[in-house]
Structures are given as structure tokens and as C-alpha cells.
Image (cartoon, helix red, strand yellow):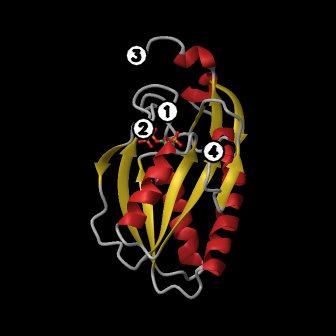
């Protein structure tokens, strides 16, 4: 169930709170099994969109007894629009060395994959022992792009989605589910 000011702006729901919770638990269980021999997994949350997923996923790993460290990076490719520009800007780097660490990048959404390709290359070049990605949502363009992603919550259509951290012009991040934004919202000038 949901109710809020945003309801009129959402065309349809793509992932409910319950579906997100279930997928998060499944992804965390897979990660816990795959990294059972790793000392301390280094999680890197990609700001800002991934904060909701990172918070839920990290706690899920905690429930499963997986020891982690949590770092934050900000790399932006979208700006104010609704499609990727192809330009990755590093707005905030991590505060610790990744040399020899097993790194798991936490993303909310992979669209063109440009941000991620850049991030994986960057972290690998810094000397990480391994770099994998967990994303809650993946759009079709990313399915076609290499390398294939190991941990994906939902494959979703190529539509503009908001909620659960995902924004349009910094709005809608607080919506607890993910929905398709009505095209009329982003085809008119932002207020
Ligand atoms: C979004 C998302 C990813 C990236 C995916 O971030 O969080 O980092 O875009 O797009 P791509 O696969 O086409 O590169 P955004 O730049 O919107 O910043 P935000 O998370 O701060 O909203």
C-alpha cells in the first residue's frame, strides 16, 4: 500500500516495497555464500541513488553475519536530465585504500553502464583484489553491455523510474517503492 503527494506523478509501480525487500534478501544471501572466505568485504555505495539499497543490503549482510566495511563514492553521469550524458564526474572518492581488498560496488540502477564500467576500471586500477557489482535495477541497455553483471535485483524496462533512492531532478528519492514517472512530468520545465 502507498499513499502520498507523489502518487499522481507515478504511472505504475515497477517494484513494491515487499518485492524490493525480498530481492535484497536474496542478493545478500548469494553474496554471503560467495564471500564466505573473505575477511572483510569492502562495500562501496555509489551516491546518491544507492543509499536506500545500500542501507537495506548492508543490514541484510549484518543479519547473515557477514563482516563488512562501508564506503561512499559519488560519480555522476545524469545531471538534471533523464538520460546518460556519457560523462562520468567523480564528486567524492572513497576514504580508504582498496589495495588487496575484495570490493563490492552497490548501485541502485545500471542504465548505459557507463558509470559502472568507469568505476570498475578505476577500482581495479587502484589495486583491488576483486571488484564486483550489486545493482538493484538494470535497464536493457546494460544487459547488452559487457561485462555481464553478477548480482541484479530486477531487470526493468527502458522507462524513467523513480523512488527508493532514484530521483528526477533530486525529487522522488524518498518514495519507498519504485515506479515509472509519468512522461508529462519530465517533458515540462522543472520547477
Ligand atoms: C545514476 C545511478 C548510477 C548511474 C547509472 O546516478 O545511480 O550511478 O546513474 O547510469 P549509467 O548506467 O547510464 O551510467 P546519477 O548520476 O543519476 O546520480 P544520483 O545517484 O546522485 O542521482
Q: Is the residue indicated by label 1 positioned so its CB lies within 8 Å of ligand 1? A: yes
Q: Which of marks 3 and 2 is nearer the N terminus?
A: 2
Secondary structure type for disc 1: loop
Up-down: is 2 above or below 97? above
Cα–Cα span, label 2 and label 4: 15 Å
Q: Where is residue 179 in the image (x, y as percent from the top left)?
A: 65, 35
Up-down: is 36 above or below 46? below
Q: Which mark is residue 84?
A: 1
Name the residue tied to disc 3.
191
Marks 1,2: beta carbons within 8 A: yes
Crowding at label 2, few (<14), some or many (≥20) Cα neighbours within 10 Å?
Answer: some
Camera sees residue 100:
yes
Camera sees residue 1:
no
Name the residue tied to disc 2.
77
Name the residue tied to disc 4.
142
Q: Is the residue indicated by label 4 positioned so its CB lies within 8 Å of ligand 1? A: yes
Q: Quadrant of residue 163?
A: top right
Q: Which of marks 1 and 3 is nearer the N terminus?
A: 1
Up-down: is 117 above or below 180? below
Q: Which of marks 2 and 4 is nearer the N terminus?
A: 2
* x 66%, y 65%: residue: 27
Closer to us: mark 1 or mark 3? 1
Q: In which quarter of the image is residue 141?
A: top right
Amino acid at each position: 500500500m502507498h499513499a502520498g503527494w507523489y502518487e499522481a506523478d507515478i504511472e505504475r509501480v515497477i517494484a513494491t516495497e515487499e518485492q524490493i525487500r525480498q530481492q535484497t534478501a536474496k542478493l545478500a544471501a548469494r553474496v554471503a555464500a560467495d564471500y564466505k572466505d573473505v575477511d572483510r568485504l569492502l562495500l562501496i555505495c555509489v551516491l546518491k541513488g544507492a543509499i536506500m539499497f545500500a542501507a537495506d543490503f548492508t543490514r541484510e549482510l549484518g543479519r547473515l553475519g557477514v563482516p563488512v566495511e562501508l564506503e561512499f563514492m559519488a560519480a555522476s553521469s545524469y545531471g538534471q536530465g533523464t538520460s546518460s550524458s556519457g560523462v562520468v564526474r567523480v564528486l567524492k572518492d572513497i576514504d580508504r585504500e582498496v589495495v588487496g581488498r575484495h570490493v563490492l560496488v552497490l548501485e541502485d540502477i545500471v542504465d548505459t553502464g557507463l558509470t559502472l564500467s568507469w568505476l570498475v576500471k578505476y577500482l581495479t586500477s587502484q589495486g583491488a583484489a576483486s571488484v564486483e557489482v550489486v545493482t538493484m535495477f538494470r535497464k536493457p541497455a546494460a544487459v547488452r553491455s559487457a561485462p555481464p553483471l553478477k548480482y541484479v535485483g530486477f531487470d526493468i524496462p527502458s522507462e524513467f523510474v523513480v523512488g527508493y533512492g532514484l530521483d528526477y531532478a533530486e525529487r522522488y528519492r524518498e518514495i519507498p517503492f519504485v515506479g515509472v514517472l509519468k512522461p508529462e512530468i519530465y517533458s515540462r520545465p522543472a520547477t
